[in-house]
Image (cartoon, rainbow, N blue to C red):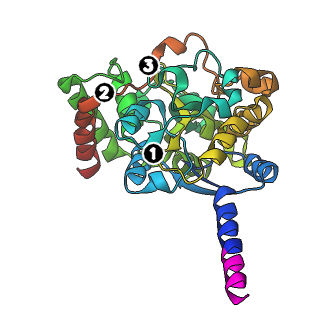
């Protein structure tokens, strides 16, 4: 009898441990990037607990996955250009499409992207732009140009650079009239020099959310940010007198995606989460909260009408040709890394 009791107790403990593991979701995501109500509703519907860890740039996220995070997290949300690197390093696993029927809701513009043909590994989350968030003093509008950062004569006040390699280089390269994906060493060195000179006049580097918050707190006049952060900031009481724009020279457009790390402990729950986010009403709720554009075609009818008309969220047709997705440059990415190290260290 004693052995039977011990055996039954052990079985209960093992069953409880298995239940606890099964009913969890470990989400690794950018800061301020999901409506807390979506998380709460998901937990309630699927009787699970969601834990969230945050990052501020793709490179940090990938480094964490390489250092063991691939077995800790169930969902990560990387940007388009870094997905091929995650695949090469075998840090993510294929989606079981039969478990994610809402993949059918993806806008054809974002389905089967070049970095993941057939959406074998990824499902789109949100898309947007990188630009300038500025507090205009005295009511005088400024010229919408990257020159506000890179030309001392046009600098309207204090500013922050984004602490992210590609976002900074993309602005400098577009100001030079070059592609954000150039690999011309001479052009990249010119962009580095622009950033070094701008760094001397700046208040330093900050993550996109941090830059937005410092503009709202009037600790700086301008920052390079992601558009959704800025749009949310403009809706706040402290956001009066602020605005966001992509400079006339153009810049970076991005698509963030949901992927499942290679050794995710809760793969089934991860696929339920992806399918949940791709539900039309949940997808609209996500964009209405984040103030980013939705890649979910079925969600469009539930998006706030004013948001659909907002050029800070959905760029006007004339701007779209000036926006570029970042490409996976393979080994040539090292040039950006080396030059960025020089910018940060000098």
Q: Of label 3 and label 1, which has the lower sequence position? A: 1
Q: Which residue is mark 2?
A: 329
Compared to 67, does 262 lie above or below? Answer: above
Q: Which residue is mark 3?
A: 249
Q: Of label 2 and label 3, which has the lower sequence position? A: 3
**C-alpha separation, residue under disc 3 versus residue under disc 1:** 24 Å
In this image, 277 relative to 84: left or right?
A: right
Quarter of the image where one finds residue 89? top left
Q: Is residue 300 among what the camera can see?
A: yes
Residue 57: x %, y % from top left: 45, 45
Residue 179: x %, y % from top left: 35, 19
Q: Of label 1 and label 2, which has the lower sequence position? A: 1
Secondary structure character of the magenta stretch overall: helix
Q: Is residue 255 magenta?
A: no
Please report the bounds of the magenta region as a residue range: 1-10
Q: Which residue is mark 1?
A: 57
Dot 1, how many residues are within 10 Å of its Cα: few (below 14), some (14-19), or many (20+)? many
Disc 1 and disc 2 in contact, CB within 8 angstroms: no
Compared to 74, does 230 lie above or below? Answer: above
**C-alpha separation, residue under disc 1 versus residue under disc 2:** 18 Å
Dot 2, how many residues are within 10 Å of its Cα: few (below 14), some (14-19), or many (20+)? some
In this image, 150 relative to 272: left or right?
A: left
Say which element carries label 3: loop
Residue 62: x %, y % from top left: 41, 46
């Amino acid at each position: 009898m004693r052995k039977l009791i011990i055996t039954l107790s052990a079985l209960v403990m093992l069953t409880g441990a298995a239940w606890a593991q099964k009913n969890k979701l470990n989400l690794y995501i950018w800061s301020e990037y999901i409506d807390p109500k979506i998380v709460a509703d998901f937990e309630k519907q699927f009787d699970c607990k969601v834990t969230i860890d945050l990052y501020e740039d793709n490179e940090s996220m990938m480094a964490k996955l390489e250092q063991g995070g691939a077995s800790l997290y169930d969902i990560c949300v990387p940007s388009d250009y870094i997905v091929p690197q995650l695949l090469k390093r075998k840090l993510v696993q294929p989606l079981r499409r039969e478990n994610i029927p809402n993949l059918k809701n993806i806008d054809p513009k974002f389905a089967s992207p070049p970095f993941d043909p057939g959406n074998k590994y990824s499902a789109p989350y949100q898309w947007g732009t990188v630009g300038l968030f500025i507090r205009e003093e005295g009511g005088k509008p400024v010229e919408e140009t990257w020159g506000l950062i890179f030309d001392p004569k046009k600098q309207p006040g204090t500013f922050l650079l984004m602490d992210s390699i590609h976002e900074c280089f993309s602005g400098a390269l577009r100001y030079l009239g070059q592609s954000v994906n150039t690999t011309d060493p001479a052009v990249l060195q010119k962009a580095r020099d622009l950033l070094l000179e701008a760094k001397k006049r700046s208040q330093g580097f900050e993550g996109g959310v941090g830059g937005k918050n410092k503009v709202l707190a009037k600790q700086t006049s301008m920052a390079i940010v992601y558009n959704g952060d800025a749009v949310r900031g403009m809706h706040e009481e402290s956001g009066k007198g602020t605005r966001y724009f992509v400079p006339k020279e153009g810049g970076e457009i991005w698509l963030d995606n949901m992927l499942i790390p290679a050794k995710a402990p809760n793969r089934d729950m991860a696929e339920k989460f992806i399918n949940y986010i791709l539900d039309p009403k949940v997808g609209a709720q996500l964009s209405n909260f984040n103030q980013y554009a939705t890649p979910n075609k079925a969600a469009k009818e539930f998006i706030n009408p004013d948001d659909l008309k907002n050029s800070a969220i959905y760029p006007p047709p004339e701007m779209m040709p000036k926006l570029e997705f970042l490409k996976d440059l393979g080994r040539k990415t090292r040039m950006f890394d080396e030059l960025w190290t020089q910018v940060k260290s000098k």
